[in-house]
Image (spheres, coloured by chain):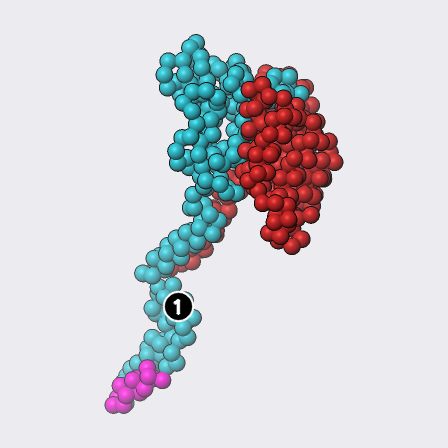
Amino acid sequence: MTDMERDPLIERVRGTLRDAARADARGAADPQAVGRLLQAVWAAPRPSLWRRAVDAWRSPVLSGLAASAVAAAALVLGFVSRGAVAPRVAAEPTTASGPATGEYPVTLAAHDGADARVATQFVFESTTARTVAVVGEFNGWDATALPMTQVTPGVWEATQPLPPGRHVYAYLVDGTLLVADPRAPKSGDADYGREGSVVMVFAR
Amino acid sequence: MMMPRFAAPIAALMLVSAMVAPAALDAQASQGTPVLTIADARTRQAVEREISRAAQRGLPVRALVAKANEGVTKQATGERIRVAVSTLARRLEQARDLLAPSPSDADVIAGADALAVGVPATMLRQIRAAYPAGSSVAMPLDVLTELVARGVPASNALEQITQLMRRGATPTQIAGLGASVQSDVAAGLTPDAALEVRARGVMSLLPSPAAAAALAPRGQRP
């Protein structure tokens, strides 16, 4: 049975017609049957707004569309309310204020704010390295997280947005050799005895 | 007809997914926990147990995973990695207690770093007390850590930082102080002299103590 067939109004019309048909079968045609039918239809209580909404939801045509629409709306609402569609990196570099040569890492200009990330440029020089990566607390010392690119022969470069604060890092050369940044202050390492480097990141 | 029968459950499922998916993404992004890279099975199990205990105590796990991975990158022995992770867990717990009542993960990690370079435990409490309740103290702790690591006596560093905080210096100004002292020391200035000069520079940009007290919301600053 379809939803249309379960509709109370339709049921009422059907009941009235059935009575009329029975009367007809007994040979007692009722000329007022049509009038009673119209009266029954007119007197049928209108379903509530909630009931009509539920019926619309359950109708074959609308149910699929309504389900998709409500789910899509919930999805958008969920993401927006949690800020997932807002820019998470609040501070993209606007202009590079660091020198082209000299001390590294260079922190680039960024807006201030609680969620600010400051684009920080790392530069390493080696003519013999085949691969170089930046490893540090900010990427869980993952050798694959921040590979450097050889921008000119012997000059390796990578840029990473970092939260303001103190960050310890090192360069991993050819996947095994760990090298502290020769141009940055050393970090010290009481745990493993192999010091890295430190960068203080702050939004300018 | 099949569509009406299954439409409601499918819609409900989609609704639940729609509400849960952003939460899951949010949690993943905020935790950003790296994956353990320890290859040796015994070391890995020992470190995982240590991390599991720390997680039960509500300590920031990502710092411990990073510490273990740092050991792998530095080709440390399994035992040394386990000890390093265990030591960091103790420092994190101590920092959390010192920065009570409600330090963030960033606060706790910064506190543990400060303890690691030799900042006395009582100074963590002093930093916490000098800053409005509920606001992060990660940046002042990072700067204190960096100054002490560069050779500034901890008491001098704390005094300058808390003075700047009381005068209403922003986290950016305090971080700038740390970075400036860092480069001055690298250029050959003594740590104390570098701090003195740079702190005066920041102070000159701030309102006077009386004006700062008048501007501060009542009860927010000591």
Q: Quadrant of residue B69?
A: top right
Magenta span contains residue B116: no
Q: Which chain is cyan?
A: A
Give the prevailing secondary structure in the magenta stretch: helix
Residue displayed at 51% across by 18% down: A183
Give the residue number, with chain letter if any, for mark 1.
A53
Residue displayed at 65% across by 54% down: B218
Q: Position of residue A74 (x, y in %)?
A: 43, 54
Q: What is the three-letter code of the residue carrying label 1? A: Ala
Task: Tell me the quadrant of the picture where the N terminus of chain B can be found.
Answer: bottom left
Q: Position of residue B187 (x, y in %)?
A: 55, 20
Residue displayed at 40% across by 57% down: A70
Residue A155 showing in the rendered view = yes
The magenta span reads: A29-43
Q: Which chain is red?
A: B
Residue displayed at 37% across by 54% down: A68
Toward the viewer: B201 or A197? B201
Q: Dot 1, crowdedness within 10 Å: few (<14), some or many (≥20)?
A: few
Toward the viewer: A200 or A127? A200
